[in-house]
Amino acid sequence: MDSPELLRFRTAVDAARAELARASAEVRDGKALEELRRLFLGRKRGRVTQLFEGLRAFEAAEKREAGRLANDLKTEVQAVLGEAESHLAVPAEAGTEEDLTLPGERPYGGAPHPLRLFQEEIEAVFLEMGFGIEEGPEIETDYYNFEALNFPPHHPARDDWDTLYIGDKLLLRTHTSPVQIRVMEKRKPPIRIIIPGKVFRRETPDPTHLPMFFQVEGLVVGEGVTFAHLKGTLEHFIRRLFGERIKVRFRPSFFPFTEPSAEVDIECLSCGQKDPACRVCGGTGWKEILGSGMVDPHVFKSVNIDPEKYTGWAFGLGIDRTAMFAFGIPDIRLFFENDLRFNRQFRLK
Ligand code: 2NL
């Protein structure tokens, strides 16, 4: 049985709770809210405060129960005050109303991806020199991706260009060269084109590899086209992209579809050719940026271009790899995380 004191305490708590409900329903502004807060939680006269004061009169046996009642009420009061506050309209102070004559805020409308911007820079240099831009399918046949490019079936050179096969004859293209083959089938020389696009290789993702990346290839075919044109054009391209003073070197190499072949290196921009432990150039001072060569006569034969009459040169460059080098980006995967804080850093000029 509750003592009369505890009964009275219960009644007082219930009365306070009823008053809370009534008074809170009438709160319309910050001032009324503050009054309500003072009515219940005020330091001397607050309803809750006084109930806590009253606890002192109880024997230990009932103090615990009375304390619980007072505490529950306090929690409720705080919840009701918080709720009432969140429903209050922000007071419109004089002079701070919305100025309807101000121009609107421009919503963020998106921006080209950094790789797209870099691709467009590359395209601009070749467009200047009279090249056209071609595109083609990302799913290719074995013929266009390999055979026409002088990779016979089962040739070990295919190992360096392993990819995902879709059935026997279809695959994800490993370079954009198949587009050049398609163009040469349809069009007679002179030809002067670049082909940017997605390519695919069997790779495990790491800071410098992904199974999908971007490439630009180029092709020039005509009468009297020589290795001198290859050198002059590629050197000009590199100077337009990286600046007039960049050091460039050509180095012999091998590709199944060109003969002779050359790789092109530029000075390491990361260490300025000075750091024997440089992570970017491995201490060599040079960074390979593209592969190139004179189109192999076997390639011309597969598209019915007479290699006795016409010669040509071609090149291939990884857009992602080159953009990483140009911007000092340490991990290729950053391009594909779609983190706007990363992407927005590359709004060029
Ligand atoms: C590299 C090397 C290269 C080509 C691509 C090509 C295309 C045709 C005929 C002959 Cl149709 N060649 N493309 C030539 C040499 C090198 O790419 O390292 N790319 C990232």
Image (cartoon, helix red, strand yellow):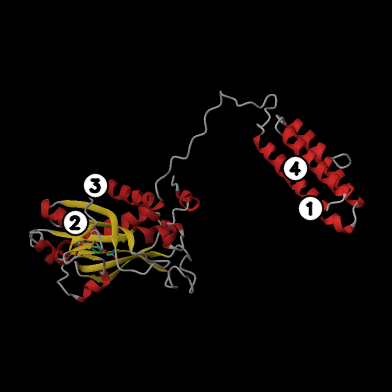
The kind of residue tagged 4 is: Val
The residue mark sitting in front, 2 or 1, is: 1
Residue 9, image quadrant: top right
Q: For mark 1, what is the residue?
A: 68
Distance in Å between CA atoms under marks 3 and 4? 78 Å
Q: Earlier in the sequence, mark 2 or mark 1?
A: 1
Q: Earlier in the sequence, mark 4 or mark 2?
A: 4
Estimate how packed mark 4 is, as few (under 14), some (14 to 19) or many (20 or more) residues with alpha carbons within 10 Å.
many
**Which residue is drawn at the image coordinates 27% and 61% (left, top)?**
316
Where in the figure is residue 242, as x and y percent of width and height? Answer: 40, 55
The residue mark sitting in front, 4 or 2, is: 4
Residue 141 drawn above or below residue 88: below
Mark 2, ligand 1, within 8 Å: the answer is yes
The kind of residue tagged 2 is: Gln
Q: Earlier in the sequence, mark 3 or mark 1?
A: 1
- Foreground residue among 93 and 207: 93
Estimate how packed mark 3 is, as few (under 14), some (14 to 19) or many (20 or more) residues with alpha carbons within 10 Å.
few
Q: Earlier in the sequence, mark 3 or mark 4?
A: 4
Distance in Å between CA atoms under marks 4 and 2? 77 Å
Q: For mark 2, what is the residue?
A: 180
In contact (CB < 8 Å): disc 3 and disc 2: no
Dividing the image into 4 quarters, which one contains the C terminus? top left
